[in-house]
Amino acid sequence: MVQSAKPTAPIWCPGCGDFSLLAAVKKAAANLKIPAHDLVLVGGIGCSGSIHNFLEVNGIHALHGRLLAQAVGVKLANPHLTVVAAGGDGDGYAIGMGHFMHAFKKNASILYIVMNNETYGLTKGQPSPTSQIGFEGNIEAPFDAILSALSIPAPNFLARTFSGDPKTMTAVLEEAIRFNHEHRGFAFVEDLSPCVTYNDTYKLWREKVVDVSKLPGYDPTDRKSMFRLYLETTEAGKIPIGVFHRPAEVARAGLEAKLLGENVGPARSEISVESNLAAYQKLLAGVA
């Protein structure tokens, strides 16, 4: 459903990590001077998926797990737009897993933000794909989205942020959006966003997060070394945050650039009879 009303007040619990993400998105858009009508925010399902209701931008409430498919469609229809998809770990890593994995390969120049709180907050605190062993009876090891993303050889921008550090989060989002604006491809940012009601991890995550850029051997242009550095850091009991992959190449590698070139896209194409008459006549002649 396309949003047309004014933004509403957030429905999140006081202290929810999603508030920091919302503020960072607003700040990043303002710093980059993105006009409100040029920003499209595609929301998923769950607490975080309502984020598009709280900003005065073009918003779409996508189907459960399908926000990436709709976001890619928007970008291909009008590559001029800044397209941000935002949802939760349950939406993106469970029912949306198929779209999640293919998004790296497709490499459309959109930003996908996953607010990871390691629980299904909206449906009252069940274990999600990222929940730790022991949480609400969970016996499965948590899914690691960054490790999976690093294993896919595509020129994507990959990062993780923490809602307890909104300043760094804003800087990362700005870099990710600039990456999209250059039509370089898909940008994925996972935000550690604690659910204060059902899984309050603020204290634990503050103790464990470590800025990966300050670790020896850090080189976000070297996927192999970053994969190793990430594994070593997590195996040491820490949670790495920061930019994990920043392709060295500056070519227009985005899906929309490959498919459309310099064309404006279907949504902005001239479709009047007068300007397309010759093409229409040629098409009709071929049919006859």
Image (cartoon, helix red, strand yellow):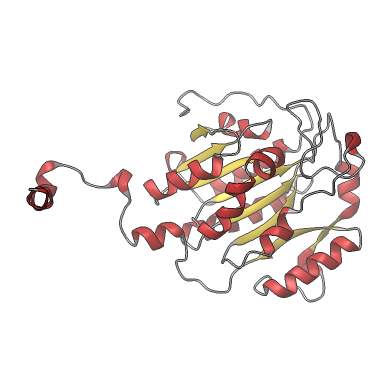
Residue 69: in sight, yes or no? yes
Instruction: Please name the residue shown 48% across and 28% down the image.
Output: 3
Quadrant in the picture for residue 209: bottom right
- Res 88 quadrant in image: top right
Q: Position of residue 85 (x, y in %)?
A: 56, 43
46 w.r.t. 248: above or below: above
* 88 left or right, relative to 143: left
User: In front here: 9 or 278?
Assistant: 278
Picture coordinates of residue 287 (x, y %)?
11, 49
Task: Decide if residue 40 is on the left or right side of residue 190.
Answer: left
Label count reads 0
Is 124 on the left or on the right of 235, as rendered?
left
The residue under the point 73% across, 70% down is 226
Q: Closest to the observer: 29 or 269? A: 269
Task: Please identify the residue farthest to the front as the structure is shown.
Answer: 288
Residue appearing at x 75%, y 26% in the figure: 123
Residue 268 position within the rendered picture, expressed as x and y whole percent measured from the top left: 30, 46
Q: In this view of the protein, can residue 26 be seen by the observer? A: no
Query: Residue at horizontal 51%, vertical 44%?
Result: 69
Left or right: 236 with respect to 37?
right
Q: Nearer the viewer, residue 192 or 163?
A: 192
The spot of residue 192 in percent (x, y) is 76, 46
